[in-house]
Image (cartoon, rainbow, N blue to C red):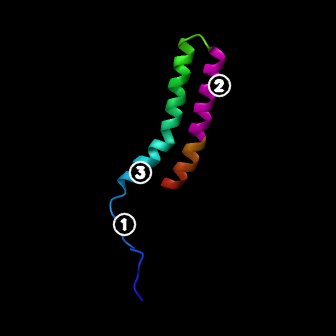
Protein backbone atom coordinates (compact mmCIF):
# COMPACT_ATOMS: atom_id res chain seq x y z
CA UNK A 1 0.00 0.00 0.00
CA UNK A 2 1.31 3.43 -0.94
CA UNK A 3 1.63 6.03 1.82
CA UNK A 4 -0.15 9.15 0.51
CA UNK A 5 0.47 11.34 3.55
CA UNK A 6 4.05 12.60 3.81
CA UNK A 7 5.44 12.26 7.31
CA UNK A 8 8.13 14.90 7.00
CA UNK A 9 7.28 18.57 6.90
CA UNK A 10 9.40 21.39 5.58
CA UNK A 11 9.90 24.89 6.89
CA UNK A 12 7.08 25.99 9.20
CA UNK A 13 8.17 29.61 9.69
CA UNK A 14 5.16 30.91 7.78
CA UNK A 15 2.73 29.17 10.11
CA UNK A 16 4.48 30.61 13.16
CA UNK A 17 4.31 34.13 11.68
CA UNK A 18 0.61 33.63 10.88
CA UNK A 19 -0.13 32.49 14.44
CA UNK A 20 1.73 35.50 15.86
CA UNK A 21 -0.20 37.85 13.56
CA UNK A 22 -3.50 36.31 14.66
CA UNK A 23 -2.33 36.56 18.26
CA UNK A 24 -1.31 40.22 18.30
CA UNK A 25 -2.76 41.79 15.14
CA UNK A 26 -6.39 42.46 16.12
CA UNK A 27 -5.45 43.50 19.66
CA UNK A 28 -2.96 46.00 18.26
CA UNK A 29 -5.58 47.27 15.81
CA UNK A 30 -8.13 47.74 18.61
CA UNK A 31 -5.49 49.56 20.66
CA UNK A 32 -4.70 51.95 17.79
CA UNK A 33 -8.42 52.62 17.23
CA UNK A 34 -8.80 53.31 20.96
CA UNK A 35 -5.91 55.77 20.94
CA UNK A 36 -7.34 57.58 17.91
CA UNK A 37 -10.78 57.80 19.51
CA UNK A 38 -9.22 58.99 22.75
CA UNK A 39 -7.49 61.81 20.88
CA UNK A 40 -10.84 62.81 19.34
CA UNK A 41 -12.36 63.18 22.84
CA UNK A 42 -14.65 60.15 22.48
CA UNK A 43 -13.68 58.70 25.85
CA UNK A 44 -16.48 56.12 26.19
CA UNK A 45 -15.85 54.56 22.77
CA UNK A 46 -12.10 54.59 23.41
CA UNK A 47 -12.62 52.72 26.70
CA UNK A 48 -14.64 50.06 24.89
CA UNK A 49 -11.84 49.53 22.36
CA UNK A 50 -9.20 49.38 25.09
CA UNK A 51 -11.22 46.71 26.89
CA UNK A 52 -11.74 44.80 23.63
CA UNK A 53 -7.99 44.92 22.97
CA UNK A 54 -7.22 43.54 26.43
CA UNK A 55 -9.80 40.77 26.26
CA UNK A 56 -8.74 39.75 22.75
CA UNK A 57 -5.10 39.69 23.82
CA UNK A 58 -5.85 37.47 26.83
CA UNK A 59 -7.94 35.04 24.82
CA UNK A 60 -5.59 34.90 21.85
CA UNK A 61 -2.50 34.36 24.00
CA UNK A 62 -4.33 31.51 25.72
CA UNK A 63 -5.49 29.80 22.55
CA UNK A 64 -2.60 30.56 20.17
CA UNK A 65 -0.05 30.12 22.95
CA UNK A 66 -1.50 26.69 23.61
CA UNK A 67 -1.19 25.85 19.91
CA UNK A 68 2.42 27.00 19.77
CA UNK A 69 3.59 24.84 22.67
Left or right of 12 on screen, residue 19 = right
Spatial separation of the CA atoms under disc 3 and disc 2? 30 Å
Is 47 drawn above or below residue 58 in the view shown? above
Task: State yes or no: residue 55 in magenta.
Answer: yes
In the drawing, what numbered circle is on residue 48? Answer: 2
Spatial separation of the CA atoms under disc 2 and disc 1? 42 Å
Q: Earlier in the sequence, mark 2 or mark 1?
A: 1
- Please name the residue that numbered disc 3 is placed on: 16
Task: Judge the density around disc 1: few (<14), some (14-19), many (≥20) Cα neighbours within 10 Å.
Answer: few
Give the residue at x 41% y 78%. 4
Please tell me whether mark 2 sits on a helix, a strand or a loop.
Answer: helix
Please tell me whether mark 1 sits on a helix, a strand or a loop.
Answer: loop
Give the residue at x 50% y 25%. 32
- Please name the residue that numbered disc 1 is placed on: 9
Residue 20: which quarter of the image?
A: top left
Which residue range is magenta in the image?
43-58
**Residue pushed farthest bottom?**
1
Give the residue at x 63% y 15%. 43
Residue 40: which quarter of the image?
A: top right
**In the rendered image, which quarter contains the N terminus?**
bottom left
Q: Earlier in the sequence, mark 3 or mark 2?
A: 3
Task: Residue 18: give x, y in percent of width and height.
Answer: 43, 48
Q: Earlier in the sequence, mark 3 or mark 1?
A: 1
- Residue 58 vs residue 31, the one in the foreground: 31
Left or right of 15 on screen, residue 59 = right
Amino acid sequence: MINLIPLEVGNLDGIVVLIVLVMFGPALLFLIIGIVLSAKQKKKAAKVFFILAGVYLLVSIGICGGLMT
